[in-house]
Image (tube, rainbow, N blue to C red):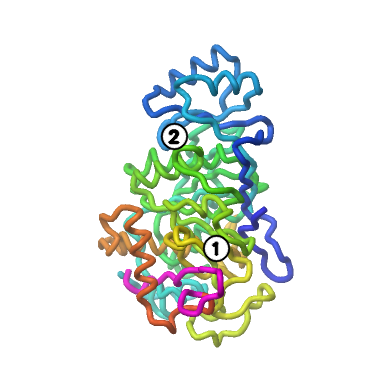
Amino acid sequence: MLRFARAAAAVVVFAGALTFAQLPTSVAAPFDSFIVVYKDSVDEPAKTADLKRRLGFKSDFQYQHVIKGFAAILPPQVREMIAKDPDVAFISPDGEAKAIASTEAVAANETMPTGAPRIESATATTVHKPSGVNVAVIDTGVDLTHPDLNVVAGTSCIKGLPEGLWGKKANDDNGHGTHVAGTIAAKNNGGGVIGVAPGTKIYAVKVLDRNGSGTWSQVICGIDWVTANSASLNIKVANLSLGGTGGVTTCDNDALHRAICRSVASGVTYSVAAGNSGTDIAGAIPANFPEVLTVTAMSDNDGKAGGTGGAPTCMSGESDDKYATFSNYATSAADQNHTIAAPGVCIRSDWKGGGYNTISGTSMAAPHVAAAVALCINSGGVGGSCAGLAPAQIVQRLRSDAAERAADYGFAGDPRSPVAGRYYGYLVSDGKY
């Protein structure tokens, strides 16, 4: 089990950590829940209605954008009949998910988290203006009334609630999603903290409940909503601070992978947490998907390079300007090709109920990069160097910009001072955006 957020102070693991357990396709998912994926030519609503009428099951979710198909509890006999249907491409097991350029003056009474200045998104006196594109946070929801956030309810994909619901049910009753949103876009409004792209509009996409629990089918529901609305709502970036164990898949044999492939093809760039098990991302999904920008975590304690800031105080075992001991890493050339690093230790950000909290994890590193992508596309209403690029090109632009920085910008464990057998990537840089 991956732990994607770690707690402050003496608690080692944050109770709301996001996890995502991968199931081999040969193993039945909990509750006999499965995701049925049709061939692209199929009329989804009509086909699903016909199958439900003939075979007597109820669907939990139906998908029409990133995949065509549905999620449902399917007894073995029914599943076998559906698998033989010529309109069905494949069936994936469902699984359990658990949580866990332009600038302006810094307003008085703001707290500057160390992550933003460390990646050159801010100085002691200046910060970015909002990005001109919007970011989807696919997580436990976001506190929709937090005074530090410009957040809009997207959708809730929690079972038992109406599908595609807009409104307060996208609210965060866990805290993790609000923390992610704050790192991306906490306002420069004279109180609280400041995000990497302050004031950027966030769309809350709730796929995990108050206990941080959910399913792959719910995550796909969120990705489906983002993809369906990305053009009309100007959503160009999505953050996925969740994941789990799993082998190599493709867009053609796994429902989650296909969903992300289709969403990326629609123009959405995904920033994804690498995972907190201190192992190779080859065994983590969606971190090992080549279509996403996978983010490892490094530790910074003072917002400056050089390793002179002392050890972080919120958790033991970490050092200033060094790779985070819990962070996953890449080994293969293919995985290295979509890996980048960001601050992820003792990150202070917004929290549910209008509050604030300090936690650690690659979940905290990923939103630094999501914000950097948004700023690279548009900063303060001005198109940036990523404007007009496809997501795959944006991934490589951020990686090449990071690699071009001087050696003293980096950290112990980056490619200039590597750890044998581990690739954490270069530290993301907002200096050009």
In front: 15, or 391?
391
Tell me the magenta residue range: 414-433
Provide the residue designation for mark 2.
67
Amino acid type, label 2: Ile
How far apart marks 1 and 2 lie (CA) works out to: 29 Å
In front: 82, or 133?
82
Label 1 element class: helix
Q: Does the magenta portion include 416?
A: yes
Q: Residue at x 40, y 54 (%)?
A: 201
Amino acid type, label 1: Met
Q: Is residue 45 above or below residue 67?
A: above
User: What mark, if any, has residue 163 been given in the picture?
Assistant: none
Label 2 element class: loop
| Residue at the bottom extreme of this rendering | 308
Q: Is residue 112 above or below residue 350?
A: below
In front: 192, or 85?
85
Residue 146 rendering spot, x and y as whole percentages: 52, 56
Q: Is residue 218 above or below residue 177?
A: above
- Residue 61 visible, this orientation: no
| Residue 56 in which image quadrant | top right
Residue 10 rendering spot, x and y as whole percentages: 74, 70
Q: Residue at x 41, y 64 (%)?
A: 198
Q: Quadrant of the C terminus?
A: bottom left
- Residue 229 relative to residue 361: left or right: left
User: What mark, if any, has residue 364 been given in the picture?
Assistant: 1
| Residue 311 in which image quadrant | bottom right
Task: Provide the major secondary structure of the magenta segment.
Answer: loop
Nearer the observer: mark 1 or 2; the answer is 2
- Residue 35 visible, this orientation: yes
